[in-house]
Image (cartoon, helix red, strand yellow):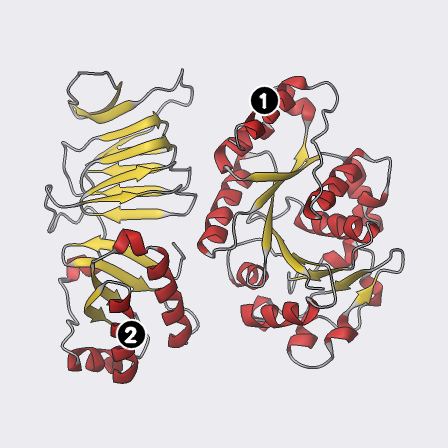
């Protein structure tokens, strides 16, 4: 088994990187894959909270890198699911506590044991981002349909390309159909037109996500949730399945334009 | 283009700057060589002036570097550094260690050394937010210029694609510079000392040419058979 390292990043903060990591990780594990999520946001860790594993942390990523524990000891298993693990970030240190090389070493050690290694990148383009991107086989960029988030995503895509990690794939998170129809939000097609990268997920704006992250229970495990379905679709696409983008609440215009874009090669 | 290695056209050739990072020259050298490799087709045959900032490079390493650079089909002409060790090794190999100061800082609009007939560069990719191209001559981009990216040229700028970022043509004061784009929708457009902020709402997109007339930046649709400016 040689696991794929997938880094989830965005540039801008607060667009849903951590939520996406937790949910895609849970969905992949639910499909039967062996998955580990690594929180690379050292000093501002959240992934443990969103995954509901905060109270079980003994060792963290920095402990592994600095040799205070074995990698195995820092792996926290999510008992609710088959094979989902977390390596938490240290909260009392900062991004300079590890280097891109350290991340590569940790991931190389994990590859033989896991199918998927998901890295939750911190916001920004500095050291933390470079750490997160260094071991990546694939990069997923999370953005929101708003101008500032798209601008940052564009910058990140450029950096990922320069690092020869591309082509990055895009998740557009917090899509609010009502606002788009009123013309107050960028449509998916607008975002894709500017960024010109392949889409791997469209996730609706949903208050239930807030509830699930607060409870530490990934929404991708709630079979009835549309948002959960969107994350499960991302997981399926990552595993190589082809999943069509569902046409929701009658907004034929938007999705019509989108499918046209996909047919012509993604814009 | 990585952010650790920057390439800029100057009168003597290409100024390649290696940005100081973690102080390990071996890493920086690797970064530099892979960037040269990546841009091979663009750089082919160029004369290189390397700015290595604080990095200290001894004579043996300098010799290796020169060989590797010539393996890339480039010639190393000079090395700039603030490290005395590096300067000594470069001088020992007969490389230049000084170029005209205004060009080392090669910022536009300093009014020095601009020859309106100097070479043009052709860039063929999408310039995403944060990317920047500075050249004393003309710049042609085949691809989009996204918001947050910029082209600063001493001469004209042609964008075969969507121009949505910032362009400064005639950056060293050339009032006759023009900017052409298939879709001219810049965040801001500058020609010589004039700055224009285009209107937000535009009708259908068509190729346009922007230039200075009567002290104002004007954009006109391109028409077949009509002379530009």
Rendered location of residue B46, percent (x, y): 20, 58
Instruction: Give the camera-side residue of A25 and A88.
Output: A25
In this rendering, position of residue A140 left or right of residue B215: right
In this rendering, position of residue A72 left or right of residue A42: right
Tell me which residue sits at (25%, 83%) in the image. Answer: B59
Relative to A245, is A163 above or below?
Answer: below
State which chain disc 1 sits on: A
Q: Which secondary structure lies at badge 2? A: helix
The 10 Å Cα crowd at callout 2, few under 14, some 14 to 19, many 20 or more, is: some
Rendered location of residue A265, percent (x, y): 53, 32
The 10 Å Cα crowd at callout 1, few under 14, some 14 to 19, many 20 or more, is: some
Q: Can you tell which quarter of the image residue B206 is in?
A: top left
Instruction: Name the residue beneath numbered marker 1.
Output: A257
Relative to A235, is A251 above or below?
Answer: above
Tell me which residue sits at (29%, 78%) in the image. Answer: B64
State which chain disc 2 sits on: B
Q: Residue furthest right?
A: A80
Residue B213 visible in the shown view: yes
In this rendering, position of residue B2 left or right of residue A148: left
Q: Which mark is residue B65?
A: 2
Residue A186 visible in the shown view: no
Rendered location of residue B158, percent (x, y): 26, 34
Figure quadrant of the C terminus of chain B: top left
Q: Can you tell which quarter of the image residue B146 is in?
A: top left
CA–CA distance between discs 2 and 1?
52 Å
Is the residue at mark 2 from the same chain as the one at mark 1?
no
Q: Which secondary structure lies at badge 1? A: helix
In this rendering, position of residue A189 left or right of residue B136: right
Tell me which residue sits at (29%, 56%) in the image. Answer: B7
Rendered location of residue A267, percent (x, y): 51, 31
Relative to B127, is B29 above or below?
Answer: below
Tell me which residue sits at (77%, 74%) in the image. Answer: A72
């Amino acid at each position: 088994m040689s696991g794929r390292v997938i880094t989830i990043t965005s540039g801008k903060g607060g667009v849903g990187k951590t939520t996406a990591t937790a949910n895609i990780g849970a969905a992949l594990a639910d499909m039967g894959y062996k998955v580990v999520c690594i929180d690379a946001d050292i000093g501002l860790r959240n992934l443990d909270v969103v995954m509901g594993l905060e109270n079980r942390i003994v060792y963290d990523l920095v402990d592994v890198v600095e040799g205070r524990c074995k990698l195995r000891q820092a792996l926290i298993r999510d008992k609710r699911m088959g094979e989902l693990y977390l390596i938490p970030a240290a909260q009392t240190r900062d991004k300079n506590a590890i280097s891109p090389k350290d991340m590569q070493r940790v991931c190389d050690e994990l590859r033989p044991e896991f199918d998927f290694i998901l890295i939750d990148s911190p916001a920004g383009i500095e050291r933390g981002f470079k750490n997160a991107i260094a071991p990546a086989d694939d990069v997923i960029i999370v953005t929101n349909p708003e101008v500032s988030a798209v601008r940052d995503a564009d910058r990140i895509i450029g950096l990922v390309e320069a690092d020869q990690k591309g082509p990055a794939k895009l998740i557009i998170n917090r899509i609010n159909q009502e606002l788009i129809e009123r013309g107050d939000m960028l449509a998916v097609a607008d975002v894709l037109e500017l960024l010109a990268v392949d889409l791997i997920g469209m996730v609706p704006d949903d208050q239930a996500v807030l509830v699930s992250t607060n409870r530490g229970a990934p929404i991708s495990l709630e079979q009835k949730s549309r948002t959960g379905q969107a994350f499960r679709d991302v997981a399926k696409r990552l595993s190589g399945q082809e999943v069509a983008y569902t046409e929701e609440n009658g907004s034929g215009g938007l999705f019509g334009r989108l499918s046209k874009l996909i047919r012509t090669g993604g814009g | 283009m990585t952010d650790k290695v920057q390439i800029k056209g100057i009168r003597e050739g290409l100024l390649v700057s290696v940005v100081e990072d973690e102080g390990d020259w071996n890493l920086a050298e690797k970064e530099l060589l892979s960037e040269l490799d990546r841009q091979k087709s663009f750089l082919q045959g160029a004369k290189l002036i390397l700015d290595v900032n604080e990095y200290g490079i001894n004579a043996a390493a300098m010799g290796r570097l020169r060989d590797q650079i010539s393996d890339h089909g480039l010639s190393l002409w000079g090395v700039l550094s603030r490290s005395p060790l590096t300067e000594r090794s470069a001088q020992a190999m007969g490389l230049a260690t000084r170029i005209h100061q205004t060009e080392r800082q090669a910022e536009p609009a300093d009014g020095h050394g601009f020859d309106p007939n100097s070479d043009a560069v052709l860039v063929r990719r999408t310039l995403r937010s944060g990317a920047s191209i500075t050249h004393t001559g003309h710049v042609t981009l085949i691809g989009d210029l996204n918001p947050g990216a910029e082209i600063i040229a001493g001469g004209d700028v042609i964008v075969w694609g969507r121009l949505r970022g910032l362009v400064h043509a005639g950056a060293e004061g050339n009032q006759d510079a023009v900017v052409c784009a298939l879709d001219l929708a810049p965040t801001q457009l500058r020609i010589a000392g004039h700055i224009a902020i285009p209107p937000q709402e535009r009708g259908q997109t068509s190729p346009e040419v922007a230039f200075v007339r009567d002290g104002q930046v004007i954009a006109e649709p391109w028409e077949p058979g009509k002379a530009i400016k």
